[in-house]
Image: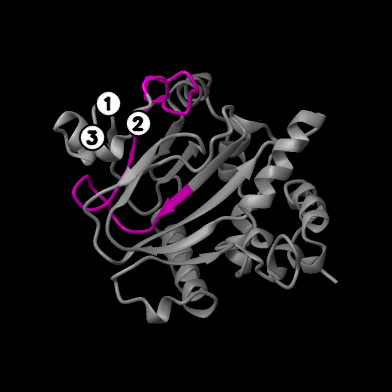
Amino acid sequence: MQLTSQQVNFFNTFGFLHMPALFNQNETNRIIEEFELSINSVGDGKNHDGTKRTMFGGPIEHRPHLCGLLDDDRITGLIGGVIGEDFNYASGDGNYYAGDTPWHPDGNWRQLFAVKVAFYLDPLTADTGCIRVIPGSQHPDHWLHDEAIDPNISQESFGVAPKDFPSSIALETNPGDVVIFNHDLFHASFGGKGWRRMFTMNCTRHTETPEDMVTQRKYLSIHTPGAGDTNTGAGMYYPTMLDTADEKRMRHLAQCVEIHDELFPHLARK
């Protein structure tokens, strides 16, 4: 898959793309089945009671079929279309979500350095916990930053509930849809129940310059298994991701493996 120039312009301007029905029903059912197997065998899904978020790391890395998402031309084309074809896959998280998620960005890189690819596995509307975004808020000179506005206290500041924060939009999704957004984009979720299923793939630019390498090392020191002192058994990724990788996939893994091993040598794959 190759993004159109209009899609690239949209992403660069507004900070996100919503790709409806990127996967068909049969493909989506298989993804959901594999996700459920992962969160219940690797995560703590069996004990989820709907009162708080249950999360586990590397959600696509525990089952060969989900690892294959990193080989799918639709996913690589989507990610590569916005941050370059030689992008780095940098782990992610799988979740049963519960309740609201306040407004926040996932990073503050002040540039297009990292993106999140989100798979929502239940139908979600504005009233049942779909993702909301503030378009353009990834830009360092956006009025949200210039005016030091916290959208989470918009009721106190403006008499407007955070879920109705001016200029925000709700991206209603169905299973099979994919949303990709800049890590610096403000996003939130309101009105959801205690069993919202979703997982993410985090990806960064492949880095070459000394300045970008500083940013890459900082990113990997925060958003990786080593940052939480998690022993995957294989360093940066869980073993299945590496054991099933061919040369094409390793293009998206090698740089993070090398830097992660440097940052966290006690967790490196033996």
Element under disc 1: loop
Mark whose residue sits in front, 1 or 3: 3
Viewer-proximal residue among 210 and 146: 146
Q: Residue at x 47, y 19 (%)?
A: 6
* Quarter assignment of residue 154: top left
Name the residue carrying label 3. 154
Name the residue carrying label 1. 167
Name the residue carrying label 2. 134
The answer to whether the residues at label 2 and label 1 have Cβ atoms under 8 Å apart is yes
Mark whose residue sits in front, 3 or 2: 3
Mark closest to the chain's N terminus, 1 or 3:
3
Viewer-proximal residue among 165 and 88: 165
- Amino acid type at image mark 3: Ser
Element under disc 3: helix
Label 3 environment density (alpha carbons within 10 Å; few <14, some 14–19, many ≥20): some
- In this rendering, is residue 226 above or below 184? below
